[in-house]
Amino acid sequence: MKLKKAIKNVRVIILLVFLVLALVAIHPNPWAQGLAIRTVSKDSAASIAGIESPTPNIPPMNRERMLLINNKPINSLKDYFDFVNTLEVNRTFTIKTNKNIYKLTALPEYNITYLNETELVNETKEVYNETTNTTVNVTEEVYVQKVEKEVIGVADIGLSLYEAPTTNIRQGLDLSGGSRVVLEPEEKISQQDLDFTIDNIKQRLNVFGLTDIIVRPASDFAGNDFIIVEIAGATKEEVRELLAKQGKFEAKIANKTVFRGGNDITYVCRSPDCSGIDPRAGCGQMPSGDWTCRFRFSIALSPEAAQAQADATKDLEVVVEDQNNYLSESLLLYLDDELVDELRIGAELKGNPVTDISISGSGIGLTQQAAITDSLNNMKRLQTILITGSLPVKLEIVKTDTVSPILGEEFIRNALLIGLVAILAVAVTVFIRYKKLVVSIPMIINMTSEAIIILGIAALIGWNLDLAAIAGIIIAIGTGVDHQIVIADETLAGEKSKYSSWKDQLKKAFFIIFAAYFTTVVAMLPLWFAGAGLLKGFALTTILGVSIGVLITRPAFAAIIQIFTQD
């Protein structure tokens, strides 16, 4: 009867609802098979076959998993590398994932050497003859850098894999393994420039197909700013090389470089007065029913870059598209030799060495607001690309760390074991203190529920669980035990007291709990807002944990204690 009454209690129902929602968000599946795909290398056998890198925000349980190679189960990284190590050049094989079946052909791996000399080669290209209205092939001699290629074996098929996740809980670098690089600006920069630099770094790394990336700001109490880059599954040498290689931006017209990032681009507008939705074009609805919006923003070129653009466009034809006049060639944007965008050139720029030009583009969406959002996101991406190579300040790599995934796995096992021992120790201590199972059992259930709800919210918002976050969870649950003991003491004291009821005692208990709660939150706020970025995970998880306890689990525990201790 008391159990039925407890289940029908509103506060207990709220706890059960949050518990169920947390389990749905965590999506536990200890029987998940195969290897999850972390990244796919560009132009690799896997990429050519159609396997795509997962998007950065995809939940771990939704990632594509490799199950079979040539119908042979792949359940561990050893199984995968055993196959790759015996792979021969041009051998065809199949990979089955939980989403598709792919046919791949192994590609040769080269040891490429770029020599410090050039050689003269013949290059053929098509040229349009206006007089005869025909296209002819013209061969001309050009100098190119000499390259030597030596086949050294069979290439990896282009997949970075890891053990299939069993929950949607994202593991931080401390647990999953990988590399961390701490960057420091050489001089003080504004918050806007710091945010833009972070977007720039993300864009640079994403060009290489990396998805498990965290780029976040941090600072110390002295006010020094840092940028922390974390890449799961990469060595610190790879991370340092990636960060060092980035920054080569080129804009080409008809295969001619007209300007580069850095000195050639003197200004990129990011303020509302010269960037945003184009007021002349605005938004409109297409025949398909979707909405489209055009954006525009201004950039400034150096005089030399403006003249190079004029020379490249003076002989181009003018074409009409959508009632607008454009040049016959587009402006192609390359980042480290990777084509990242293509822009149309207005006819008014033909042979004109202007330094101030406007770049436009568009975005689409099911609604006008969605189209506006997509358009502004595309604009921000273009702005980031154009400014690549001309960061507001030079960055210095001040520290690199590599964390082994084996250490992370060992820590998780030890943490679970210690957590189980701690729960049992609390249960035994509480039972010895109260001599009542109706107090100790609900307390254990409450502690477990609190941990599950915290992890569920972390999985839902995509928060990475690292050592600092785990420390915050331990603090929150430990605080919860103290609060539950206060509730139990005051409730039982109210049952025995002749001068006050259990309701009065319970009000007193919650006054103590809320006082402790606000004290904890106030203590955590400096770690969150004052700039201690490395401890932000600890502050966030602690505040989240104690808030869940005070608002959800503690009231439910109080209701259960009231029901089961009443005669």
Image: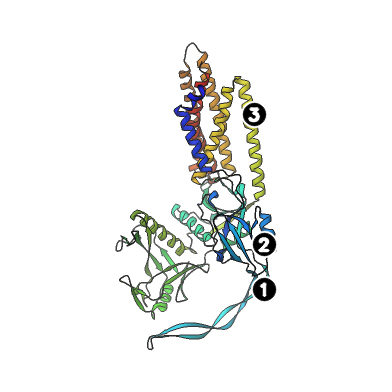
Label 3 and label 2: CA atoms lie apart by 48 Å
The furthest residue to the bottom: 132
Amino acid type of the residue that numbered disc 1 sits on in the rendered structure: Glu
Q: Residues within 10 Å of mark 2 (few under 14, many from 20)?
A: some
Q: Residue 496's spot in the image, x, y percent?
A: 52, 13
Looking at the rendering, which quadrant does residue 371 occupy? bottom left
Nearer the N terminus, badge 2 or badge 1?
Answer: 2
Front disc: 2 or 1 = 2
65, above or below 550, in the image: below
Nearer the N terminus, badge 1 or badge 3?
Answer: 1
Whether residue 338 is visible: yes
Front disc: 3 or 2 = 2
Q: Residue 189's spot in the image, x, y percent?
A: 47, 54
197, above or below 249, in the image: above
Residue 150 is marked as: 1
Give the residue number, with chain letter if any, for mark 2: 84
Give the SS element for disc 1: strand
Q: Residues within 10 Å of mark 3 (few under 14, many from 20)?
A: few
Label 2 and label 1: CA atoms lie apart by 20 Å
Residue 373 is marked as: none
Amino acid type of the residue that numbered disc 3 sits on in the rendered structure: Ala
Label 1 and label 3: CA atoms lie apart by 63 Å
Q: Are marks 1 and 3 in contact (CB under 8 Å)?
A: no
Give the SS element for disc 3: helix
Describe residue 424's horizontal placement relative to residue 136 as left or right.
right
Q: Nearer the viewer, residue 321 or 541?
A: 321
Q: Residue at x 63, y 34 (%)?
A: 420
Describe residue 71's horizontal placement relative to residue 546 as left or right.
right
Give the residue number, with chain letter if any, for mark 3: 425
Nearer the N terminus, badge 3 or badge 2?
Answer: 2
Q: Count numbered badges in the picture.
A: 3
313, above or below 390, in the image: below
